[in-house]
Image: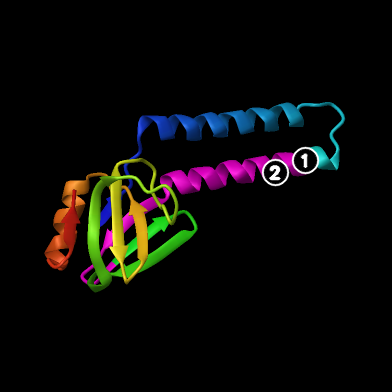
Amino acid sequence: MKFKSRKDLFFTFVIYASVVSMLALAIISFSTKHLQIEDILGTIIIILSCLFILWLFYGTYYIITSKILHYNCGPIRGKIALEKITSIHKGKTMRVGLKPATTKNGLIIKYNTFDEIYISPQTNELFLKEILNRNPNIKIIE
């Protein structure tokens, strides 16, 4: 089952404000009459950066299969065996570490001995229900 990442208003505003600001810089840089190679390269880099930011923002989702949790955040991809997950902390926000998420108050998944990842599915409850159907041994910590 596929779960899109939840997007909060603040994070959405920051993403769009960054992209619009960067594109405005690119347009201003490109509108000069005497274009130089640096202007063209700078504009290309800005546009590629905007595309990368939007890829991260819209390309964040999670897939639960019968034995594996897949996570995708643009080019950041990975998988966790459901049998390796020991606990899930609900409604928390991780400050450091791997965070393929687009909002706060998501889920911290602890797996293996010391590994953890922060995710933010569209609905935490549906995600937890689905993952517990596949591995009922996972502890849910509120």
Q: Do the residues labelled 1 and 2 touch (CB within 8 Å)?
A: yes
Question: Few, some or many C-alpha atoms within 10 Å of disc 1 (few <14, some 14-19, many ≥20)?
Answer: some
Residue segment shown in magenta: 40-68
CA distance separating discs 1 and 2: 6 Å
| Location of residue 8 (image quadrant) | top left
| Location of residue 41 (image quadrant) | top right
Establish if 131 lies above or below 68.
Answer: above
Residue at numbered disc 1: 40
| SS for callout 2 | helix
What kind of colouring is applied to the model shown?
Answer: rainbow
The stretch drawn in magenta includes residue 94: no
Residue 33 appears in the rendering: yes
Q: Is residue 72 left or right of residue 121?
A: right
Mark 1: amino acid? Ile
| Location of residue 79 (image quadrant) | bottom left
Establish if 92 lies above or below 109.
Answer: above
Q: In this view, does 124 lie to the left or right of 119?
A: left
Residue at numbered disc 2: 44
Establish if 124 lies above or below 98.
Answer: above
Q: Where does the image place residue 27, in percent across and percent down from the top left?
A: 69, 29
At x 84%, y 34%, the residue is 35
Q: Where does the image place residue 2, in percent across and percent down from the top left?
A: 27, 56
Which dot marks residue 11?
Answer: none
Question: Few, some or many C-alpha atoms within 10 Å of disc 2 (few <14, some 14-19, many ≥20)?
Answer: few
Q: In this view, does 86 lie to the left or right of 47?
A: left
Q: In this view, does 21 lie to the left or right of 1?
A: right
Q: Main secondary structure of the magenta part?
A: helix
Mark 2: amino acid? Ile
In-front residue for pair 61/136? 136
